[in-house]
Amino acid sequence: MTNIIRIGTYNTNNLFDRFDDPYNVRDDPWRAHLEGTRPKKLTELFALGARIRSSNVHVLGLQEIESYGALRDFVQAQVGPEYKVTDGVVSVQGNDPRGIDLGLLSRFPLGRIISHRFQKIDNRRVFSRDCLEIEVLKEDRSGVLLTAFLCHLKSKYSRFERGTAAWVADQKKSDAKRAAQVAATIEIVKASQNVETDRFVVMGDMNDTPGAASLQAFLRPDNPLRLTDVLRTIDQDDDAAESIKKRPRDTHKWSRDDDTGKRLTTYSQLDYLLFSAALTHQFTGKAKVEHRKYTTGSDHYLAWAEVDLDA
């Protein structure tokens, strides 16, 4: 008898609703020309919901959610009753000026939810969005099943032309910001978890590839949280940072103009499921990035990994 559950992460790419938030001009769907964010098309919402349903994930961390209300409506309309909005759906406002927040769907009841959005270094906020700490409880609420730490690190976006000196300088600033966010997340986890015995996962869109220096405090073999990037168990021949061909571990696709002006699409791993030592011990060895079916609606792919809680 096994007690196998799936833990996943998914950047939904601007899951905005169709209602204007009067406190956020950029949210007005009728002001797209003023950096507003329009709501998704119904076909895209269907694709997002269908992918979540078909993946059969029990605990799913989400990025780029407008609000709890937007997430609740999406779950009720497109995902279904597997995630009860009264017990297993949450989104908390973060720091992003566009209003893209973190959220979580769980088939298990939720316990304490802690936002770290106000954490500062040198009087500046560390997190571009947040580091959201969420307790996932056992079905009978008798204890904590696992703790999820949701991340959406600093974007690599730059307003400068790719390859220019200004772009290079801007990328260095972004790299430093991500590294600081990784360091802050490590201290947050260490403050509440026993890295040897507690079941926890650090997951989300880290906005950089596995070889990036900014992520090595999470990814190097001797990392201070004893984390394991379980998606790395997915077999793949090519470990380059980017590829023009989609590979099994790639979680993101990016279309841009290349140096000749032609449209180029590249793929990379930007999303991670980093299991604690205790959770890694229960990892079944089965992990997947969902590349098939319902690929529209986001520029990211849903990723999941299985654990056997009885192991």
Image: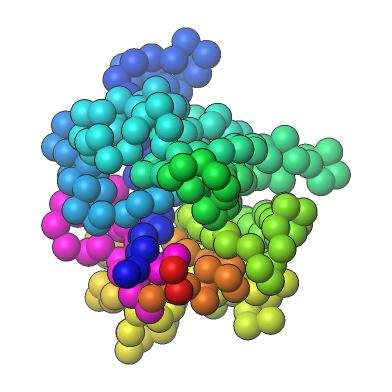
What residue sits 68% from the left and 40% below the top?
116
In the displayed image of the protein, which residue is found farthest to the right?
Answer: 122
Count of labels in the image = 0
Relative to 238, does residue 9 appear above or below in the rendering? above
Q: Position of residue 94 (x, y in %)?
A: 58, 34
Q: Is residue 61 visible?
A: yes
User: Which residue shows up at 43% across the image and 32% down it?
Assistant: 87
Q: Quadrant location of residue 67?
A: top left
Q: Nearer the viewer, residue 10 or 311?
A: 311
Measured as percent of width and height from the top left, residue 184 is found at 73, 54
- Give left or right: position of 139 versus 180: left
Pick whichever, 92 or 162, lies toward us.
Answer: 92
Q: What is the magenta range?
A: 285-309
Residue 99 located left or right of residue 127: left
What residue do we see at 38% from left, 14% from top? 20
Q: Nearer the viewer, residue 284 or 310?
A: 310
Percent from the top left, x then y, of residue 238? Answer: 35, 86
Q: Is residue 308 magenta?
A: yes
Q: Can residue 150 be seen from the camera position used here?
A: no
Which quadrant holds the C terminus?
A: bottom left
Picture quarter with the N terminus: bottom left
**For residue 7, which quarter of the picture?**
bottom left
Q: Would residue 99 be counted in the magenta stretch?
A: no
Residue placed at 43% from the left, 45% from the top?
139
Give whichever of 23, 131 is nearer the camera.
Answer: 131
Q: How is the image coloured?
A: rainbow
